[in-house]
Image (cartoon, coloured by chain):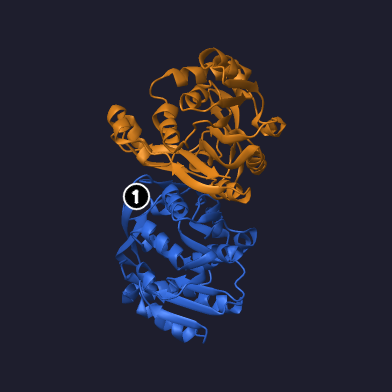
Chain colours: A blue, B orange
């Protein structure tokens, strides 16, 4: 089972504050790209792995989904979801995504935003997802990009700046050395798993999925105009999004 | 049509010398990984795009292929192929890979080693390949990895060394800015095209292919033991290999 870092009070409050800011990377970079790739959800059932505050679950209902199950390992996150993103068609369950084979239900769409890099056994996760999907159904997930998860030095990769303070390049290491990375993010000891692009995509293909789209997030011109610091995102990929069909 | 740099005498002699050395990256890193992914070629017809010296064409015959067409834009490369890798089942044609729709033949396998990064219109190339493949046939290609093609500064990305001269990290830039890169490799003005992983893989999926394997080259322990300098390849991906089925 993956680490339940979101129930750590210090981590939770740091993360909650981050997501409350208007310039967080989820909302500027990852969520628009994810929304852009969503399949038609009308009359569909959806499973959201690592649903967090439940904002996507509510969005899926607004897009016409008839039933949404949101699971999260963190009871603290689900408390927010139940209070801020509740709906009679949404069911929130406190469960690790490594246990989804216990759900007695199949879904038309499995979604996961920025959670898979916490899971150790990726091939098993993808295979379990394949099992809970109906034929023709889609899996769509995002995670931290392998270039970002690669560096194994407690700090991670590094943006380099020129003498005027402009971001110019990115330095990373350890790409071809998969495995656990322990970093400081709000608190010490946050456990993530680095896997290469090749390992991730081949595992998706090996499970039987047809890969439909591979997206590496890049800021739009509109975002750059409003948040010039986002220009640094032209330098490197930040999040990886994969859409695949059973 | 892509630049015919291999017919430049200075470039050709530099490249020929490189491939004659036993420690070149093609033979240590890319060719073993490509060989590892080859489908069963017995009784199959093969098209090799950018066949160069024809070594792979000859290998395909040795693996049981019944007919191999090798095309290359460089007459100089084909002269070597015809003299060093000739076989009655192999046909070498001086042709740009952008013109393969002119071939009046379909193939069971389309192969290309380290040539696609010279082609400007990747989506069109992939779509043309799909057309010349028989149903169920495979496409397998390698190219320079997008992390390596990204940096737009005439020099490319950079390995960083510690005070003892050990390689420790890699610095790159311009990843999310696709397009032409003009670099110095044996001669000035070698034209290549940078595309992101997402752009490459989504183009393959969009053409109708089922992606079966995505491989980013990594040196084996045997290679590291014999050529310790190859340890630097743990730091970053170097070549990208994609295998897909029609």
Location of the N terminus of chain A by quadrant is bottom left
**Residue depicted at 43% across the width and 80% down the height:** A92
Q: Is residue A13 visible?
A: yes
Tally the marks. 1
Residue at the far top: name it.
B83
**Residue depicted at 46% across the width and 21% down the height:** B19
Q: Which residue is mark 1?
A: A178
Residue B123, given in percent of the width and then of the height, sits at: 65, 44
Of residues B237 and A165, the one drawn nearer to the viewer in this rendering? B237
**Residue depicted at 60% across the width and 45% down the height:** B178
Residue B143, given in percent of the width and then of the height, sits at: 52, 36
Of residues A21 and A149, the one drawn nearer to the viewer in this rendering? A149
Depicted B120 relative to depicted A236: above or below: above
Q: Is residue B192 visible?
A: no
Residue B90, given in percent of the width and then of the height, sits at: 57, 21
Residue A129, given in percent of the width and then of the height, sits at: 44, 64
Of residues B72 and B138, the one drawn nearer to the viewer in this rendering? B138
Q: Horizontal placement of A147 versus B163: left or right?
A: right
Q: Horizontal placement of B244 versus B238: left or right?
A: right
- Where residue A115 sits, quadrant-wise, is bottom left
Residue at the far front: name it.
B43
Graded by Cα atoms within 10 Å as few (under 14), some (14 to 19) or many (20 or more), the crowding at tag 1 reads some
**Residue depicted at 55% across the width and 59% down the height:** A230
Q: Secondary structure at mark 1?
A: loop
The chain to which mark 1 is attached is: A
Of residues A228 and A100, the one drawn nearer to the viewer in this rendering? A100
């Amino acid at each position: 089972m993956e680490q339940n870092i979101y129930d750590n009070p210090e981590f939770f409050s740091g993360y909650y504050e981050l997501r409350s800011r208007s310039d967080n990377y989820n909302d500027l970079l990852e969520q628009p790209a994810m929304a852009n790739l969503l399949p038609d959800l009308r009359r569909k059932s959806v499973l959201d792995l690592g649903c967090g505050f439940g904002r996507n679950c509510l969005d899926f209902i607004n897009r016409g989904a008839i039933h949404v199950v949101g699971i999260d390992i963190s009871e603290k996150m689900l408390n927010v979801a139940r209070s801020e993103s509740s709906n009679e068609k949404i069911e929130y369950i406190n469960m690790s995504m490594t246990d989804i084979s216990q759900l007695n239900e199949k879904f038309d769409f499995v979604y996961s935003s920025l959670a898979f890099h916490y899971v150790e056994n990726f091939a098993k996760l993808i295979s379990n997802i394949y099992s809970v999907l109906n034929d023709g159904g889609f899996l769509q997930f995002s995670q931290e990009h392998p270039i970002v998860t690669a560096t194994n030095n407690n700090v991670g990769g590094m943006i380099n700046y020129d003498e005027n303070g402009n971001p110019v390049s990115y330095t990373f290491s350890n790409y071809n050395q998969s495995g656990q990375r322990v970093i400081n993010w709000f608190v010490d000891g946050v456990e993530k798993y680095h896997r290469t692009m090749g390992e991730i995509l081949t595992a998706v293909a090996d499970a039987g999925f047809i890969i439909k789209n591979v997206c590496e997030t890049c800021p739009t011109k509109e975002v750059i105009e409003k948040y010039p610091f986002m220009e640094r995102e032209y330098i490197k990929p930040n999040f990886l999004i994969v859409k695949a069909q059973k």
